[in-house]
Amino acid sequence: MPPMLWLLLQVAAPALGFYFSISCPSGNQCQQALLSGNDILLYCNSSGARWYYLFTRGEKGTFTSLTNISNMEIMPEGSLLIKDPLPSQTGLYHCWNKNDRQVVQYEIDFQDVTTLHVTHKGLGQRPLQNETLHLGGKELIFTRWEPWQDCNHCKEPGERKRLGYCYIEERLEEAMPCGLYLGDVQVWSSRLRPELQVEACHVQCTNNTQLKMNYVIFDNFRLDEETEFVWLNCPLGSIYRPVNWHANDTPLTWESQLSGRDFTTFLDPSTGGRQLQVFQPAIYRCFVQQEFVAQFSPAANPEALEAQWRENEAQWQEARKAPRGRADSVLKGLKLVLLVGIVLALLGALLKFMHPSPGRKSKQVLMVK
């Protein structure tokens, strides 16, 4: 996509809700499980705010400033933007105002999105079952599900998804996200991972618009010559929002992908379908929260255009010859009919001459030389 256009989208993104925002009442402490690899905005309404962190994994110590973390940026209004967060960045995040007073505190568990367990209810696929973890007691590992997101399509059948986060519950204790509960404790279990569940949906269209953004067209994508595929990125899309793709007006569904029927495209589960991998040229359109936001058209290939031009030229020349050929055939047919008519007339006259009518004498004389 054009670099300048992508830059403009990035600049305008926070105001348009490009980043999924987490908020917490002022003066409170909030706990939240999220997914790694997906941008997040921790809200803090304090201009000139300073942020400090204490990661629960790796080296522990006093709270450290976030100013030197490459994937983190303090926004002008005070919120903290974390791009492509890592599981290792699970920990405590504190926002302080200019007067060195804490405004809000977040306890964030960035669960590893690369281990995401994806299921579709329509295919009979089942989510993860509860398990018991033994760390000196009997801790229960379970999935805490978020509410279903809105249907990604309206008027026609669509799909909706919901996220599930790994939680651990100890007897008589409040459940906690797995990463925050375990901290630095090294435990291996296939159950310690987040989930994504999909199901079919069918809703009516409404006039409620939330993004309020004009769509953009990217008309220069092309397949990589070596890998023979390309990744398309839907602006404003997120694993936390409904996303829908169409290829030449045909919806691309999770059901087709998870059932193994569609190998022409690949919806990336780790981004909730925001990124689409394509293997053949087509017109691809993406929708976020049922709103059309972008269209991707394949770039023109000079060799393909020349071949198409030659094919069109040949068809045109053939079309020019076709009427003349048909006219020649008709003319030949008329000549043949006329010739047959003349022959038949001559034969009839000859027969009449050789066999005169009864009771009548012929005065004609046939002369043979």
Image (cartoon, grey):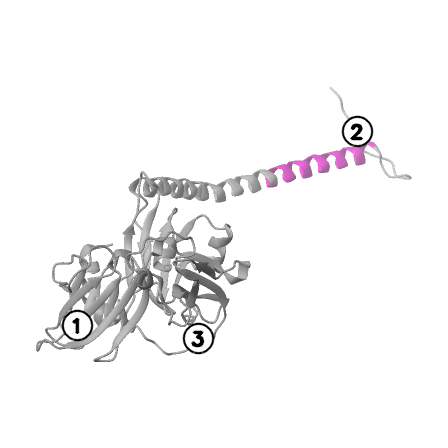
CA separation in Å, label 3 and label 2: 99 Å
Q: Position of residue 101 (x, y in %)?
A: 12, 77
Q: Amino acid at mark 1?
A: Cys
In front: mark 1 or mark 3?
A: 1
Q: Which residues are magenta?
A: 334-354
| Comes first in the chain, label 3 or label 2 | 3
In front: mark 3 or mark 2?
A: 3
- Left or right: 125 as drawn, with respect to 91: right
Is residue 99 or residue 298 the one in the foreground?
A: 99
Depicted 132 relative to depicted 15: above or below = above
Is residue 252 or residue 351 the one in the foreground?
A: 252
Tell me, yes or no, whether the highlighted magenta stretch contains residue 357: no
Q: Determine whether the residue tagged by mark 3 lies in a helix, strand or loop.
A: loop
Q: Position of residue 279 (x, y in %)?
A: 38, 46
CA separation in Å, label 2 and label 1: 133 Å
Q: Position of residue 230 (x, y in %)?
A: 32, 48
| Comes first in the chain, label 1 or label 3 | 1
**Which residue is denoted by mark 1 in the rendering?**
95
Identity of the residue drawn at 25% across and 63% down: 91
State whether the magenta stretch is mostly helix, strand or loop.
Answer: helix
| Comes first in the chain, label 2 or label 1 | 1
Residue pushed farthest bottom? 26
Identity of the residue drawn at 47% across and 53% down: 257
**Which residue is denoted by mark 3 in the rendering?**
205
Depicted 172 relative to depicted 168: above or below = below
Identity of the residue drawn at 45% across and 71% down: 154
In front: mark 2 or mark 1?
A: 1
**Which residue is denoted by mark 2 in the rendering?**
365
Identity of the residue drawn at 34% across and 58% down: 271
Q: Determine whether the residue tagged by mark 1 lies in a helix, strand or loop.
A: strand
